[in-house]
Amino acid sequence: MTFKTQMRYNFPEIKIFGEIRKMLFNSAEFLIFFPIVVLVYFIIPKKIKYLWLLAASYYFYMCWNARYALLLFFSTAVTWASGLLLERIKHGEIDEARKIPAKKAVVALSFFLNLGVLFWFKYVNFAVATLERLLRLVHIQLSLPEFDILLPVGISFFTFQALSYTMDVYRDEIYAEKNFFRYALFVSFFPQLVAGPIERSKNLLKQLADPQKFSFARFKDGILLMLWGFFLKIVLADRLALFVDTVYGDVWSYGGWYLIIATMLFGVQIYCDFYGYSVIATGAAEILGIRLMENFDAPYLSCSVAEFWRKWHISLTSWFRDYLYIPLGGSRRGKARKYRNKMIVFLISGLWHGAQSTYVVWGMLNGLYQVAGELTEPIRTRLIDACGLHRESFAHRLLRCGITFVLVDFSWIFFRASTVRRALAIVRSILTAGNPWILLDGSLYECGLDSKNFWLVLLCIAVLLLADCLKHRGICVRKVILRQDVWCQCMVVVFAIALILLFGLWGPAYSEANFIYFQF
């Protein structure tokens, strides 16, 4: 019997008011839900604010699939109990020599239970299929059942956030939260529940314990953040998806330069899609008086792959650094161990993104980039000095940024492709590209975007690049706007709303598009 893995990445859904609805940031439901949450939050007494946010957060998640809220509750209960146990062991009358093993046992149990649930829902089919392929190499045929499992939205995000609390309590970096409902809000806080940022208890839990009064300044800041996020998602990312999906959906018809352009645009699409979600989440939390960590810092202006990963999905890369790379030994035990640890981190990072071999290859490539970069650094330094080049000159930095983008964008091929074989076919087509005339004869306007929309995309990318360049130079456009008179601020908000309504990709009937990172 041939085993067929069937992990479906269509999103879990629940029927509400007789229709199938999902609580997306770019949905009409959220535009009704969020103002109600904010209004009630600032009206009710301070003592019960966290209970209202907890109820709103669980409702938000249950709009995807009510049953999977049990998984969220399970992860919450296990890590909350582990925190209390760790605190009890710390202050208990146990011998000092036995405290460390006891605390490690609690942490191990918390990780085992949480990662066990994550493994079942996200990796069981991948593991079984991999086992079958390995056995087939030694001529052993294995007959296994077929698992049809729906992936709970955001499970990787809230699992990692909950586990970070266990580790923080173990390291005495945070107190053990005794109020179960407040801790449950930390795990389920709706703005960042399903796609991050993956918050730390040292930041978010402490803020939840001390609710802030309404601040008009923070309200304006949050609105501007949300509008920027909606622009990135609805105007740019969703429009780029039309081109990318058309080309990647038929790589045999759209070869060569079609794939080169689509791959470059996918690098921008996934940035705008995920960055857009993070900014909307940050803005929504800001309005509620809660400051989330920054998740992106102009990553495509990086001069090396290592710098790129310090600026891309910062909450996840810092999570792996603090809770995996450093515990493995980091760079403290020689270069060989350092490179081994980096490869482990990036391979696991690839698996974190999905139970597919394409993600493993993507993670491996980014790990190899960093190892190769460090190994070749002395040679490159000598060559630069020998040629009399100035490393900090604009031309040299621009060249390094370009090379970094090409390397990162090449790895996105494996991230976007459905299989490794398909990704390799795309690479071959790109390397043998022989149709440069499509860049000039209008053929690009037949790949999901007409000429007007294609040039609109390029204009929006230029706006994004300008914003990132200003940010890279320490200039925050949002803060510049907030320093202006009220009438000027109102004009900017009205203009931004009009731009999003006019150029947003709504379609003939409103149909919101999922955020890419919801599937992880």
Image (cartoon, helix red, strand yellow):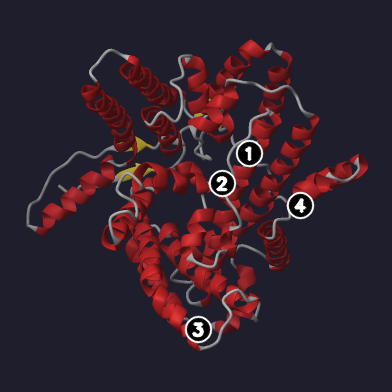
Residue under the point 50% across and 83% down: 385
In the picture of the structure, the residue carrying the numbered disc 1 is: 282
Cα distance, mark 3 to mark 2? 35 Å
In the picture of the structure, the residue carrying the numbered disc 2 is: 295
Q: Amino acid at mark 4?
A: Val
Q: Residue 366: x, y in percent?
A: 40, 61
Neighbour tally class for label 4: few under 14, some 14-19, many 20 plus, Cα within 10 Å: few
In the picture of the structure, the residue carrying the numbered disc 3 is: 385
The secondary structure type at the circle numbered 2 is loop
Q: Are marks 2 and 1 in contact (CB under 8 Å)?
A: yes
Judge left or right: residue 149 versus residue 497: left
Q: Residue 494: x, y in percent?
A: 84, 43
Q: Amino acid at mark 1?
A: Thr
Cα distance, mark 2 to mark 1? 9 Å
Cα distance, mark 1 to mark 4? 16 Å
Q: Is residue 98 above or below residue 126?
A: above
Cα distance, mark 4 to mark 3? 37 Å
